[in-house]
Image (cartoon, rainbow, N blue to C red):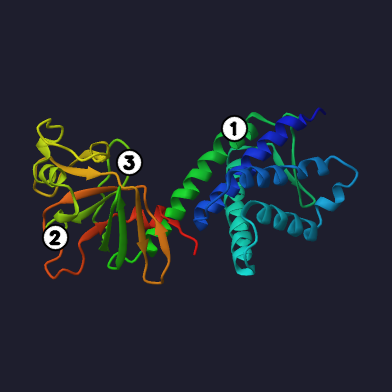
Amino acid sequence: MAIYLDIIWFLNFCIDLLLLLLTAIVLKRNLVKWRLLLGALLASSVLFLVVTPFSSIYYHPMFKLAFSTCIVVTTFGFRRFSYFIQNLLTFYFVSFICGGGLIALHFFFNNEMVILNGVVTTKSTGLGTPISWLLVLIGFPVIWFLSKKRFELIEVRKVKYEEIVDVDLFILDRHLKLKGLVDSGNQLQDPLTKKPVMIIDMNNLQNKFPKSIVQQAKHPEMIGDQSLEMECGWEEKLCIIPYRGIGQVNQFIIGIRPDKVVVTLENGDELDSSNVIVGLNFTNLSSEGDFNCILHPQMLIQGKKRLA
């Protein structure tokens, strides 16, 4: 039986890379690319141990624990013990979900797998069956994607939509300190970039923006008007976003691509939510003035936790 070790190693490398990446996504870790690649390389290198006379070591639980510890520390580093344990347990959890999904699909589609004396065996060659390869090449990315979406859905439900948070908005030389309401009803996205849109109340903030920007925010149809003199750097940050409210026809809102948006939660955590577009709106958002912007829930889900 011929075993193509290089192909099997490359598949393991890709799978380990995706598992470590999903672990980072679930925990919202800021990954260093070279550490991620090094961690995946270390994880896949255990394959070469299996084909040596020392393969018995691989099956020992203590070796597996020690090896997975090295993988996690290599990929995420070691800052404190609680940080390491959280990384390790989440890595196991993600691996069990994706691996269990693959085994379930394999049992469902494959009739060449049998269990002899408690050991799973397959009737195949060193190249594997077509079903096995399809599961690895197609099934694993699908399970990975569905798991990622499921984790995001769970996180959405954890978000307190009635929570008012502090928002620091940076646009060129302007710094605005805002109060933002996390609103599940705000599902506005830029149709081109798919970036979430946060809405700010311009009624009391228009003095923070150039007059030309305020004029265009009041009259979106004027965007691109050559008669308006734009301050340096602002024109390239402008965009126009179509939207439709309940009982309304299609309308447009002027948007600005910010340099940075930092959201401070009630527990003091700071999220870098710069991957967003700021919509300029002249509708009064809060009659009592409790907040002056509405945040898209994806800003809290996709935001990267800033390190102190």
Image coordinates for residue 244, horizontal then vertical, percent: 15, 44
The three-letter amino acid code for the residue at tag 3 is: Lys
Q: Earlier in the sequence, mark 3 or mark 2?
A: 3
Q: In the rendered view, would you say 162 is above or below 55?
A: below
Q: Secondary structure at mark 3?
A: loop
Residue 131, image x, y percentages = 62, 32
Residue drawn at 80 percent across, 40 percent down: 48
- Disc 1 target residue: 134
Q: Quote the CA–CA distance across marks 2 and 1.
A: 58 Å
Instruction: From the viewer's side, name the closer residue of 70 and 118.
Output: 70
Which tag, 2 or 1, sits closer to the chain's start?
Answer: 1
The residue that mark 2 highlights is 204
Q: Is residue 213 left or right of residue 115?
A: left
Residue at numbered disc 3 = 194
- Residue name at image x 60 percent, y 49 percent: 20
Q: Is residue 151 above or below residue 122?
A: below
